[in-house]
Each structure stands twice: as C-alpha cells, then as structure tokens.
C-alpha cells in the first residue's frame, strides 16, 4: 500500500493536469470559433475601460448608421414621388397649353380629360409611406398626408357649383387651395403644420428640411390639375369661351407648379447629399474603430490552432502516462 502511494499521487496530479489542459482546449475552441480572445481584461492590458468605451462608441455609430440608412430611403422615396408630380403634371400642362396656342380646343379637352387620373396619381404619390412613416404629412407621420382624390374633388366641385361666372369659378378654385380656411386646408390636407423630426447627421449637424403636401408648389400643382378636372367635367366649362379660360388657367398653373416642384427637388437633393456624406463618414469612423477593437480582442487563428495542437499532444502524453499507472482506457479517462 505504501509503495503504491507515489503512483496514486502521480495519477492524481496527472488527472488534475489533464483537467486544466482540457479546460484550456475548450477555451481555445471557443476562441477559434469566434475569433475573439476569451479573457477581455487581459486583452485590454488589464484595463477594460477603453474596450468598453470602444464598444459603446461602435454601438452609437451603428444606431446612427441605421438612422441615416432610413433617412436616405425616405429622401429617395420622396424624390421619386416629387419626380412623378414634376413630370406628369408638367407634361399635361405643356400639352394643354400647346393645344390652346393653336386654337385646338378639341385636343385641349382630350388632354384635360386625363386630369382626374393625374390628380388621383398625385394624391397617391403624396400619400407615399416609407419605413412605416408618411413622407409628406409633416410631423403627423402615422397618417396619410391627403384625403382621397374623390373627396377633395367633390368638395371643390361643390364650391364651383355656387359660382355664377367663369371668373367666380376660377376664384373659388384658387380660394379652395390657397385660403388658410379653404377646403384644401380644412379637409384635403390631413397632415401636421409642423415638419417631421429632423435627422441627426452626427458631427455634420442635422437635416431639418422636409417636404409637406401643403407646400405652395404642391398646392399649385393640385390646383392646376383640379382646374382641368373642372374644365373637363363641370357644366360651367362646357361652352366657349369659358372652356378656354379653364384650360389656360389650368395649363399655366401646372407649368408654374412644375418649376416650384423642381426647386423642392433641388433642396431635397442638397439634403440627400448631406445625408450620404454623413453616412460615408459614419461608416469610415466605424471601420476605424472596428480595426482598433480587432487589434485588442481578436485571436490569431494560426496561433490559436498551434496552441490547440500542442495541447492535444500534451493531453495524449498525460493519457499515456495515466493509463500506465491506472490501466485506464482513453474513453474512461475522458469521462
């Protein structure tokens, strides 16, 4: 019994050594799988404060990048909607005025007949949503910017019904869209009179510009389309010279509105460029910090694999010696 005591003690020491080797191998397995050192305190030189600060800054940059991506998407969707208004309304205005210029009222009426569809498409574009937010409703991001086209046109038609002359009808249309107490303001525009929240660009400042559906250029465009709807559908414009007056007013209104919408698009384009620049700067800063973090916590896979192989060799040696001392099988030893 006494003679076997050294062998027993040696076996216990070998078992403990095997446990330590096995634990280290498990740690290395995790490091090889994740590419990160397991002991972050040691990786940071004993002071993890810098690492935690780095992680916090990366989290803030990630949140900013997400906001900027959403802002880029909203701006692009807004540009698309405004582009549709600019092109379709402008083209219709040019076509109607061109027909009037050569005295072709038949063609003018044919073009005006498409004004209702154009009005409906414009309302649809202005009710565009992106990322769960209404784009042209100002701060009222949860709801539509405008009532449906039929509701707006029905209210306008009721105003025109009360007009006795062409001049009265045209004045009623203008008041409907431009008077703060007019039909467009009270039942057509459903958004807020405050702009939607701005976008924080980080060190580059913020973007507060937002296009609302009650912007003057957009109201001018809707008024021009609505004037042509009345010209094509209302009895007051059924005969000359009233019809020509409506065609002229509607066409000129659309051409003027096209220029105004072009300015809105240009302003939005400036904001898009600022958002894109901020997104690029944020990505660059995040990339630089990712490199710093990687230098601190990344585990060299070649080095880790070499250490793992060395530990495997040590484990095999421990097993061999232990097996000689106790007659263990490898399976029993590893249990």
Image: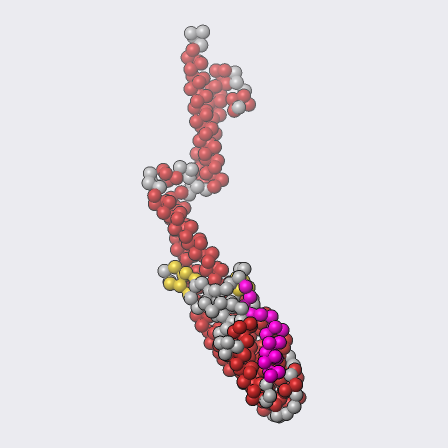
Q: Residue at x 53, y 68 (%)?
A: 190
Q: Residue at x 59, y 89 (%)?
A: 165
Q: How many labels sit on residues?
A: 0
- Please tell me whether residue 144 belongs to the stretch shown in magenta: yes
Provide the residue span drawn in magenta: 143-162
Q: Is residue 79 above or below residue 240?
A: above
Left-right relation of 285 to 87: left
Q: Is residue 8 visible?
A: yes
Magenta span dominant secondary structure: helix
Q: Is residue 176 above or below residue 10?
A: below
| Quadrant where the N terminus is found in the figure | top left
Left-right relation of 39 to 118: left
Q: Residue 77: image x %, image y %?
A: 53, 66
Q: Is residue 81 visible?
A: no
Which one is nearer the viewer's eye here, 68 or 334?
68
Which one is nearer the viewer's eye here, 295 or 225?
225
Q: Residue 102: image x %, image y %?
A: 61, 92
Q: Is residue 244 above or below residue 142?
A: below
Q: Residue at x 51, y 71 (%)?
A: 213
Q: Which quadrant of the figure has residue 127? A: bottom right
Q: Which quadrant of the figure has residue 41? A: top left
Which one is nearer the viewer's eye here, 145 or 278?
145
Q: Which quadrant of the figure has residue 11? A: top left
Q: Residue 137: image x %, image y %?
A: 51, 67
Q: Residue 257: image x %, image y %?
A: 51, 80
Which one is nearer the viewer's eye here, 18 or 226?
226
Left-right relation of 101 to 27: right
State the scheme by which the image is colored: secondary structure
Q: Residue at x 41, y 12 (%)?
A: 6
- Please tell me whether residue 153 belongs to the stretch shown in magenta: yes
């Amino acid at each position: 019994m006494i003679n076997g005591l050294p062998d027993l003690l040696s076996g216990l020491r070998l078992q403990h050594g095997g446990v330590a080797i096995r634990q280290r191998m498990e740690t290395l397995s995790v490091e090889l799988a994740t590419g990160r050192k397991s002991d972050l305190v040691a990786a940071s030189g004993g002071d993890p404060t810098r690492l935690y600060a780095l992680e916090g800054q990366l989290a803030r940059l990630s949140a900013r990048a997400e906001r900027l991506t959403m802002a880029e998407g909203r701006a692009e969707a807004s540009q698309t909607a405004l582009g549709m208004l600019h092109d379709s309304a402008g083209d219709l205005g040019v076509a109607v005025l061109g027909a009037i210029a050569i005295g072709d009222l038949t063609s003018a009426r044919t073009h005006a007949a498409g004004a209702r569809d154009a009005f409906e498409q414009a309302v649809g574009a202005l009710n565009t949503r992106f990322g769960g937010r209404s784009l042209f409703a100002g701060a009222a991001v949860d709801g539509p910017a405008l009532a449906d086209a039929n509701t707006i046109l029905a209210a306008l038609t009721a105003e025109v019904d009360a007009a006795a002359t062409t001049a009265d009808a045209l004045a009623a249309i203008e008041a409907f869209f431009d008077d703060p107490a007019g039909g467009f303001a009270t039942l057509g525009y459903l958004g807020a009179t405050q702009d939607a929240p701005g976008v924080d660009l980080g060190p580059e400042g913020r973007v507060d510009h937002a296009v609302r559906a009650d912007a003057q250029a957009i109201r001018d465009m809707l008024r021009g389309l609505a004037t042509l709807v009345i010209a094509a559908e209302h009895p007051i414009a059924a005969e000359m010279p009233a019809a020509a007056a409506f065609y002229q007013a509607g066409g000129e209104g659309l051409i003027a509105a096209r220029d105004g919408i072009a300015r809105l698009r240009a302003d939005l384009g400036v904001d898009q460029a600022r958002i894109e620049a901020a997104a690029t700067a944020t990505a660059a800063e995040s990339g630089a910090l990712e490199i710093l973090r990687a230098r601190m916590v990344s585990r060299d896979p070649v080095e880790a694999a070499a250490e793992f192989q060395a530990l495997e060799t040590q484990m095999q040696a421990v097993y061999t010696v232990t097996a000689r001392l106790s007659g263990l099988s490898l399976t029993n030893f590893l249990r």
